[in-house]
Amino acid sequence: MRKTRVPFDRAAPFYDKTRGLPELVMRQSVKTLIRELKGCKSILDAGVGTGRFAAPLQKSGFQVVGIDISRAMMEKAAEKDVDNLVHSDACLLPFKDSSFDATVCVHLLHLLADWQEALREICRVTREILVSMSYERYNPLREGYNRLVKSLGYESRRLGKGEGQLKDLVKPLKTVFIATYDVQADERLMHLSRRVYSSQWTIPKAINDKVVDELKLQFSGQSLPKELWIIVWRTKDVQAYFNNFAERR
């Protein structure tokens, strides 16, 4: 396993409980995703994880292939009757060019230091569109955590860029609003205290505990609004960005 990856085996037992969406929001997310994939038959789920999107897409009739570097996460997907699971690195996909009509990529790129290479591979194997989801509201709790950790001499950081940040580099074909919903700060504080997020895994427990205790004084009892969007790119536009970037270098 490359050191430029964040393997998620340790998160498999609690991933769905700590990353899940409210039931109504999840239902609307899947409904919107299916609508945006209309006309596509073959779908690559890059970073399939526990299969939370692959499962409903397969049940809706799409031909979905899911890839992941975490066997433990894929075992959770298999428990949801997700099939066509391939153990693979997103930066070295074992598929021919233009194998899929579309790729779904949600919460993957921030785990890869060489996220650009993953995108190049995704574009290579995808004929039409790249689809992702993004949270578009400022997160004061997360920003507060990052700031406090840094003040204590550590850094909570992601290896790569989130899919939402890609829209600042490559103009999307479209962005589609899904829902606004509230997240309870107490629940997120509990998750932070247990270090369930990958950006926390290099932070010592004593430092994490100190930061969370301070955040509890600021955020306990609050509701934090979030907005969820689907973002769609033409893969040819993403490819053009990287080609132009290479030429500029």
Image (spheres, helix red, strand yellow):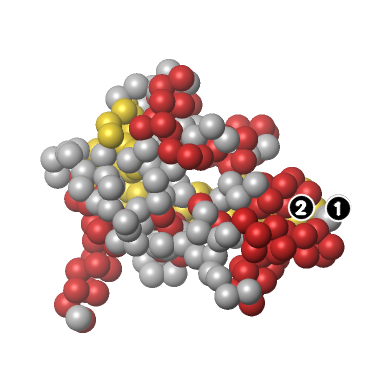
Q: Is residue 126 left or right of residue 231?
A: left
At x 64% / y 63%, what residue is drawn? 207
Instruction: Judge whether residue 31 can be spotted in this image.
Output: no
> Residue 125, position in %: x, y?
21, 45
Quadrant of the image occupied by residue 172: bottom left
Q: Which residue is mark 1?
A: 221
> Residue 234, position in %: x, y?
32, 54
At x 68% / y 51%, what residue is drawn? 193
For the residue pair 217 and 185, the one nearer the viewer reads as 217
For the residue pair 52 and 239, the one nearer the viewer reads as 52
* Label 1, residues with CA under 10 Å away: few <14, some 14-19, many ≥20: few
At x 36% / y 32%, what residue is drawn? 71
Above/below status of 9 relative to 223: above
Label 2 residue SS: helix
Q: Is residue 145 left or right of residue 163?
A: right
Mark 2 vs mark 1: which is more N-terminal?
2
Above/below status of 96 relative to 240: above
Q: Quadrant of the C terminus?
A: bottom left
Instruction: Judge whether residue 9 can be spotted in this image.
Output: yes
Type of amino acid at the residue the image marks with label 2: Ala
For the residue pair 92 and 233, the one nearer the viewer reads as 92
Label 1 residue SS: loop
Type of amino acid at the residue the image marks with label 1: Gly
Residue placed furthest toward the left: 96
At x 46% / y 49%, what residue is drawn? 107
Q: Which residue is mark 2?
A: 185
Q: CA distance from mark 2 to mark 1?
A: 6 Å
